[in-house]
Image (spheres, rainbow, N blue to C red):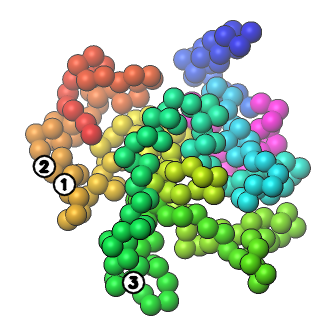
């Protein structure tokens, strides 16, 4: 039954049919089509939508989790962590958890981070670190505190308030409340999850650039980078599944 359902969904993707909106996600889509239509449009063009994976599947939370609140009768969280993605992407989660990227948040204990917070930053906030190191390396996701030291919650849904110095944050080594490290959408973006985006050198270049780590500048000026930009249409960036140089594309190597 599961195999048959998977193959049926695969045919929907290949034939470019409409998004599959399951019962669990129907209310989310209907409401957010009015409240945040661009977000829904991005999701509708995603592989997730075509396989029936929707808002609730990724944003579901357990009662009692610090980032959870009851929204329209269901416990959800705005914060989606690698552990959440691991419910489906087990192998990818394990690979990432053992990667150098996952440890990027360890810079928070380094002298470089102290310099960003204290020396280059403003005396009353961490603006320089937030827009510098933390933007790519990640930060500890924290919650705003009430006067009694508990998590500050607001509104009729008792929604937890995330500390604006630590959120939004899509740093690849982000330290999450559930104990996981990282942020999948550092490379995969949100809601559309386009494979061609994550395969594009520019995606890596949003962090790997500048005087301390000029990999993007080096790549763009190299024969490899020049060949890529001249032949992007031959790179087969949209290919589903494995994407192997010499088999699926040949015009240029990428990151």
Q: Are marks 2 and 3 in contact (CB under 8 Å)?
A: no
Q: Are marks 2 and 1 in contact (CB under 8 Å)?
A: yes
User: Is 149 above or below relative to 28?
Assistant: below
Question: What range is drawn magenta here?
Answer: 22-47
Q: Secondary structure at mark 1?
A: helix
* Label 1 neighbour load within 10 Å: few <14, some 14-19, many 20+: some
* Label 2 neighbour load within 10 Å: few <14, some 14-19, many 20+: few
Q: Secondary structure at mark 2?
A: helix
In the displayed structure image, the side of residue 204 where residue 122 appears, left or right: right
Quadrant where the N terminus is found in the figure: top right
Residue at image location 43% in from the left, 67% down from the top: 108
Residue at image location 75% in from the left, 48% down from the top: 61
Residue bearing the label numbered 1: 217
Which of the 4 image quarters holds residue 140?
A: bottom right
For marks 3 and 1, give the CA distance.
29 Å
Residue 68, given in percent of the width and then of the height, sits at: 76, 56
Residue 56, given in percent of the width and then of the height, sits at: 74, 41
């Amino acid at each position: 039954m599961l195999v048959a359902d998977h193959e049926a969904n695969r045919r929907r993707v290949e034939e470019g049919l409409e998004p599959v909106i399951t019962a669990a996600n129907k209310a989310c889509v209907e409401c957010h089509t009015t409240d945040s239509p661009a977000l829904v449009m991005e999701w509708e063009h995603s592989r997730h939508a075509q396989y029936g994976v929707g808002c609730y599947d990724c944003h579901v939370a357990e009662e009692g989790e610090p980032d959870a609140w009851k929204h329209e009768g269901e416990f959800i969280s705005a914060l989606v962590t690698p552990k959440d993605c691991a419910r489906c992407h087990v192998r990818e989660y394990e690979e990432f958890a053992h990667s150098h990227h996952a440890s990027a948040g360890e810079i928070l204990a380094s002298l470089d981070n102290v310099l960003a917070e204290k020396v280059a930053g403003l005396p009353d906030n961490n603006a320089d670190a937030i827009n510098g190191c933390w933007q790519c390396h990640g930060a500890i996701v924290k919650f705003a505190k009430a006067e009694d030291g508990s998590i500050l919650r607001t509104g009729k849904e008792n929604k937890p308030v995330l500390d604006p110095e630590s959120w939004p944050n899509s740093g690849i080594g982000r330290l999450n409340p559930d104990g996981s490290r990282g942020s999948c959408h550092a490379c995969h973006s949100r809601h559309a999850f386009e494979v061609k985006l994550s395969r594009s050198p520019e995606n890596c270049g949003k962090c790997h650039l500048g005087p301390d780590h000029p990999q993007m500048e080096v790549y763009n000026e190299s024969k490899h980078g020049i060949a890529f930009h001249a032949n992007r249409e031959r790179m087969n960036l949209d290919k589903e599944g494995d994407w192997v140089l010499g088999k699926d594309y040949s015009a240029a190597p990428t990151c």
